[in-house]
Amino acid sequence: MLNEHIGWLCEHKFHTIRPGLVRIVRLLQRLGNPHKTYPTVHIAGTNGKGSTCAILSTLLSAHGLKTGLYTSPHLIRLNERFRINGNEISDAQLADLLGFLRSLIGDISITYFEITTALAFLYFAKEEVDIAVIETGMGGRLDATNVIQPEVAVITTIGYDHMKYLGDTLEKIAFEKAGIIKRGRPVVIGNIDPGPLKVIIDRARALQAPEYVYQRDFSVEREGPFWTYRGTYFFSALDLALQGEYQGHNLALALRSLEILEEKGLLKIDENILRSALKEVEWEGRYKKIQIGEKLLLLDSAHNLQGVSALLHSLEKEKFLPYLLLLGLTDEEGTKPKLTILESLSKFAEKIIISDFLSPRKPVTKAEWSELLKNHPLRDKVTITSNPDEALRLALSQPIDKILITGSIYFLGEVLKSLKARKYSDV
């Protein structure tokens, strides 16, 4: 029954993004406005929002709060989008809720993401969570999640992505992300360039929303393998399970948000609990290392220029180079700078394998890559394959010990499916 309901869900205009809140508001009203029955944290940003969600939700759960987590997209299973205390929704619960929404919605015009967002709000209400951490799907102002009144909003980063919908300048994109700020509710702001940062701060001040800015009001520093945080609290030698230099920034955003939630009386921070919880944070597909025989694979969902830049910085820091590059990208809107992404990642690549793959978002196909690279200097370095399994087999057969696998989250999901059939160990 679950597969039948998922088939119904996938019929709902996945390829047609339709920003706006009218449809989701009407649906939630019919459900009794479940999103109003528990406190929330709302997290937006071009990159880093998923990891920040994972860190914060883990910390909240560890402190004894029954914590919902709604993120997107999923790597392998739809269930991944809906979690409570780190546990995915069961197949039975997901089938029940999808079946209920299916009967309620009927032939009403609504999108895939609006249905999953309503499902998350309903699931968390039924399970009586103490708090829910909610990640935006795209942008903020017109995102289906932007019906909540969060205890704190977080804007992680501003970069170029989804420009067809969010605008072609960083300031326009920042305006859309700043749409999650609510009157009088605090906002935590990440490492953002001065232009878009001003847009966000101006919006916060217009709404009398207290703003807390990274490096101005709180910060994090790397000390060997550990992190030192300075905010309301001072924590040294923090051991975060998530790898990658860029995760320190996400850690700082999560910790400042946790401090604000304490100030609001939702919890009392316990340093011992906090330290233990950070060692247990998991977020699949973000700087994940896998060992297969002599090969060391690193998987990371860097799918835009800002994400690629952060990834390359981490790779250089820990000398994960040279490498074989295995890449798969989507380009739903036709605006992604595909060649620029490839050129950036090719800097330390001895060989490049690009793969076509199945995705609900439009992948860059084998034919499209062939055309793009027809007269490109990198052409002789690149092999283009039809599917991730073929690409992975080819990569593992090469005499290169380090393999970087990156691009679309959906691509990483397909690679992980192939990897599950092989013997590997997490590093």
Image (cartoon, helix red, strand yellow):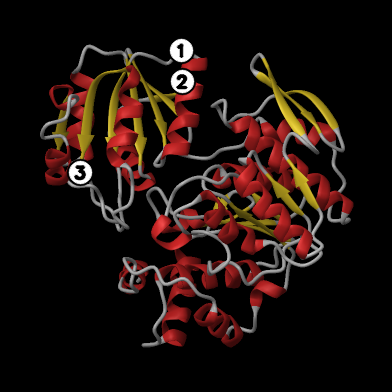
Mark 2 or 3, nearer chain start: 2
Mark 1 or 3, nearer chain start: 1
Residue 396, by quadrant, is top left
Residue under the point 54% across and 73% down: 118
Q: Amino acid at mark 3?
A: Asp
The N terminus sits in image quarter: bottom left
Residue under the point 84% across and 56% down: 266
Please tell me whether residue 315 is drawn above or below residue 157 in the rendered image. Answer: above
* Residue closer to the observer: 389 or 84: 389
Q: Mark 2 highlights which residue?
A: 315
Position in image of residue 152 (x %, y %): 74, 56
Residue under the point 23% across and 25% down: 352
Mark 3 element type:
loop
Q: Amino acid at mark 2?
A: Leu
* Residue closer to the observer: 421 or 330: 330
Residue 8 seen in this snapshot: yes
Mark 1 element type:
loop
Q: Which mark is residue 319?
A: 1
Distance from Cα at disc 1 to Cα at disc 2 = 6 Å
Residue 135 seen in this snapshot: no
Distance from Cα at disc 2 to Cα at disc 3 = 25 Å
Q: Mark 3 highlights which residue?
A: 356
Please tell me whether residue 383 is drawn above or below residue 5 in the rendered image. Answer: above
* Residue closer to the observer: 409 or 78: 409
Position in image of residue 185 (x %, y %): 79, 61
Please tell me whether residue 13 is drawn above or below residue 134 in the rendered image. Answer: below
Q: Amino acid at mark 1?
A: Lys
